[in-house]
Structures are given as C-alpha cells and as structure tokens.
Amino acid sequence: MKHIAEQYHYIDKTSWQIADQFILDSEKLTAISHSSPEKVKQVQKVKQVQLDLCILAFHCIWNNQNIPLAQNILKQLIKESDQSLYPFLYFLESKLHYFNGDYQLSLDCLEKSENNLTFDINSNIDYRKLLICIGSINETDPDNIEYAVMKAIISNDRGNNYNAIGEYDKAIDAFTHALNLQIESYSTMAHANIAYTCRCMGKSFKGKKMYLEASKHYHVAHSIANTVYKDESHPEVIAIRTALFSNAP
C-alpha cells in the first residue's frame, strides 16, 4: 500500500492525489483508519499508519475543508497514537476549529500543542517527515530545527486567530515571533513557510489600515512564492497574489 506521508508535499499540488485517492476510495480509507492495533503491529507499521493519518487529516482540513472526516481521524489519533505526536495533533485540531470559526477553541488547542512540545523532537525523524509534508520544512533545511519550526507554526496560527477576532496588534506580535524563529532556523529566506507568515502578517496590517506595511509584506510573500512554487494555480500562490493586488483602502 502506498503511504501518504512518504509522497505528500503541500507545495506540490500533484502530490495531493494520493490523499484524495484515500478519501475517494472507501476501502482504502477503511484500511488505513480502522486497522486493529494487533493487525498493524504484526506488520510493524503502527507509526507509519499514524503518520499517514496525520497528513490525511491535514489535507482534509487545509485543502478540502472536509471537517467531519478530519474530526473522525483526529479523534482516533488522539486516542490511540503515541504521545510524541500530540503537539502535531493538537496543532491540526486547532486548524479544524479555526476553519469552523471557533477561534477560542483553536487558541486553546494551540496552547495544548505548545505545552506538549519537547525539545527532543529534534531527533525525531517522524516530526521532520510530517513537517516536510506540510511544507514547513524542506529536505535541504538544516538538521535539528523541528522544535523551533513547531514553535513558529504554533505562533503563526495564534496570529491567524487573533487576526480573525480583530486583535491585530496581538496578531502582528505572534507573526513577528514566528518569522523570527523561521529566519533563525532556515538556511534561506526562499521558504514557503516564510511566504505564508508574511501574507498572514500583511492581513493584520491591512486590518489596522496600515496599507504600506501590508504591501511590504505581501510583496515579500509574492517574491518568495515565485521562487518556491512551480504552479501558479497553487492555492497559496493565488492567495498571495490576491492579497497583493487587492491591498487598497
């Protein structure tokens, strides 16, 4: 069976097909999400199944907004997975609540995610694999940055929640913290995660009617996206382009 977490890359839209196939094929989805612990252990693939489900949940939330399926997957994972995955799972759950408009619940999950973080995820290859899948780490990025990158994406999503409830100063502080962690961690500014943070920060400056500051961050995001993404129809490329050209009083 093909494994989602071995092939999925958020920045490459063509790789999404493997996740879509599992969603469309009920037999595959049943096989991946309802394997008994005993059966999975027999083939020594417990963790691989959990990683596949993590990325499937991410795809359902971020790309499809298939909230019911994502809820079911996360419920199972939180109940059955190794505790080392909890920070990532609570991060995913926070995204689910964010898309549902439940911003306080989303912030609560981000708090749980950060509270469960331990520095030893820097030696955890599963975390690196997950973060590569969602575009938060590139395969060429330095080693031992997983902890800092998790801190950054948690802070970025805090900013998104603050922005959604109109607390723009708190949002900008959160995005600035995320950006500082990213700049310290990556070997390059040309990174999808940095482009995303700059776009998010631009939204908050626009919310404060600081259009020049918003434009500055949108331009940085747009410049990075032109380097990182090869597909102009990628949703993030479209979101950055739309933000840049609609930034007006």
Image (spheres, rainbow, N blue to C red):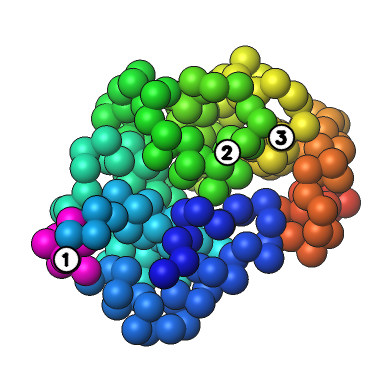
Amino acid tagged 1: Lys
Residue farthest top in this picture: 184
Q: Which residue is mark 1?
A: 39
Cα separation, mark 2 vs mark 1, equals 32 Å
Residue 136 - label: 2
In the rendered structure, which disc, 2 or 1, sits on the residue that comes first in sequence? 1
Q: Mark 2 against mark 1, which lies toward the viewer?
A: 1
Instruction: Tell me the SS state at disc 2.
Output: loop
The image position of residue 143, as x and y in percent, is 54, 22
Inspect the magenta stretch and tell me whether residue 195 lies in it.
no
Q: Is residue 64 left or right of residue 199?
A: left
Instruction: Tell me the SS state at disc 1.
Output: helix
Q: Is residue 166 visible?
A: no
Give residue 18's quadrant in the image.
bottom right
Q: Badge 3, how many Cα within 10 Å: few under 14, some, many 20+?
A: many
Q: Which residue is drawn at the image coordinates 55% and 48% (left, top)?
A: 134
Amino acid tagged 2: Ser
